[in-house]
Image (cartoon, helix red, strand yellow):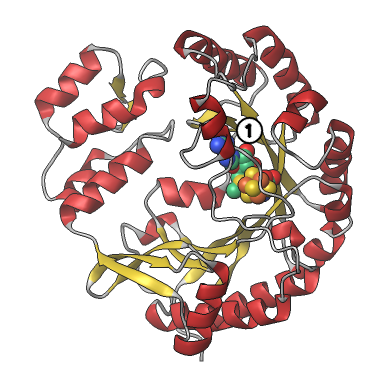
Amino acid sequence: MRPVTPPDHPTRDAGFGIYLHWPFCAAKCPYCDFNSHVRHGGVDQPRFLAAFRREIAHAAASAPGRTVTSIFLGGGTPSLMAPETVAGLLDAVAGAWCIAPDAEVTLEANPTSVEATRFRGYRAAGVNRVSLGVQALNDADLKRLGRLHSVDEALAAVRVAAEHFERFSFDLIYARPEQTPQAWAQELREAIAHAAEHLSLYQLTIEPGTPFFGLAQAGRLVPPDDDVSRALYDVTQEICAAHGLPAYEISNHARTGAESRHNQLYWRYGEYAGIGPGAHGRLVLPEGRTGTLTEKAPEAWLARVERDGHGIVETESLSAEDQGDEFLMMGLRLAEGIDPARYAALKGRPLDAGRLAALVSDGLVAQRETGRIAVTPRGAPVLNAVVAELAA
Ligand SMILES: C[S@@+](CC[C@H](N)C(=O)[O-])C[C@H]1O[C@@H](n2cnc3c(N)ncnc32)[C@H](O)[C@@H]1O
Ligand code: SF4
């Protein structure tokens, strides 16, 4: 008999999601510090699938009876998986929990022609949304970013995605070296012409330990200064809003109703299981909200799962203090902001009225008629400082 969904829970109201991490890529991009690895000798997909199945069963035993509202196959490059592997993963999730009839099932894909040939198979496996890493719409920058696709190839992949999936999104990275607001504005308008309902627009971050970090340290890669970055950010907000794709989160833009439900679940501090190498989870267990983290290295994760039935290396019981801080950090990324009553319930005390009033009078935070608290367009570029001030 299927377990019943537990009664509504303030955390679970946001849904229950499953994140599955596929940690392999065809090449490592020089800016990327995600848990992604190149395996020239190939990847034993059936063996990894068997391990994912075991870890899914383990998560379902810890958190039974939920209804899954979203599944996200992220990476790495999940579009390197054979459609049969994706079908096996989705079948395992469906065997472990009830799946909501309108569940969102997203797969991250790199926009090469080889990967586009697999889209039909992913659709048949149950994927209903793809998120494509286009990154740039000029070939010189794609090359500098170490990407394996050209603009033409990426746009062809976008067209194939549009044919097979009712929903798709693509990612662009801006604030690239030497990028001017004028050039970005033109590129962004072109992107919007190809986008349907959703775009993720990330400012290039120079991550420690990446080749870009070494180049930046040596002065051979110069990211835009603060003023240019700010101008690039402002151009992004203006153009997207003017085209009906306002930001619903710091880096994510969508038509109303087309937001990524899975990512919203993170930002609304919902409950999710993290499966696969280096995946984070946040489960609401009888003992309280609990963070989980799995072994990062793919082969070490595989060995652990084959030995123990799961690859979890850290389980952390989150204190009220932690939960309030996490909720604030995630929720203030959203244009809809946070419900201060939920913050108080998680944290065990309300927001500091004096600090809140000061941020409101500085124009960095606004309190809506509904009582919700959100960061203003002026506060968004300094979000981390706003969160630190409110959490103190
Ligand atoms: C985990 S990656 C996976 C997507 C897929 N493998 C790809 O590259 O097309 C998700 C997105 O993060 C963004 N990203 C990765 N590293 C970044 C960085 N250092 N700065 C800004 N955006 C970054 C890219 O836009 C990328 O598409
Ligand atoms: S950006 Fe995507 S393709 Fe490039 S290394 Fe990171 S995860 Fe892999």
Is label 1's Cβ within 8 Å of ligand 1? no
Residue 127 seen by the camera: yes
For residue 338, side relative to residue 65 (left or right): left
Residue at x-position 49% and y-position 37%: 207
Residue at x-position 31% and y-position 70%: 315
The furthest residue to the bottom: 1
Identified by mark 1, the residue type is Arg
User: Where's residue 203, x and y in %?
Assistant: 55, 27
Q: Which residue is mark 1?
A: 255
Q: Quadrant of residue 361?
A: top left
Nearer the observer, 131 or 207:
207
Nearer the observer, 324 or 233:
233
Quadrant placement of the C terminus: top left
Q: Is residue 146 above or below residue 265?
A: above
User: Where's residue 113, x and y in %?
Assistant: 89, 48
Residue at x-position 24% and y-position 12%: 362
The furthest residue to the front: 218
User: Where's residue 119, x and y in %?
Assistant: 83, 57
Q: Quadrant of residue 350?
A: top left
For residue 381, side relative to residue 260 (left or right): left
User: Where's residue 391, x and y in %?
Assistant: 19, 37
Q: Secondary structure at mark 1?
A: loop
Q: Is residue 226 above or below residue 122?
A: above
Q: Quadrant of residue 42?
A: bottom right
For residue 174, side relative to residue 137 (left or right): left
Residue 138 seen by the camera: no
Q: Residues within 10 Å of mark 1 (few under 14, many from 20)?
A: some
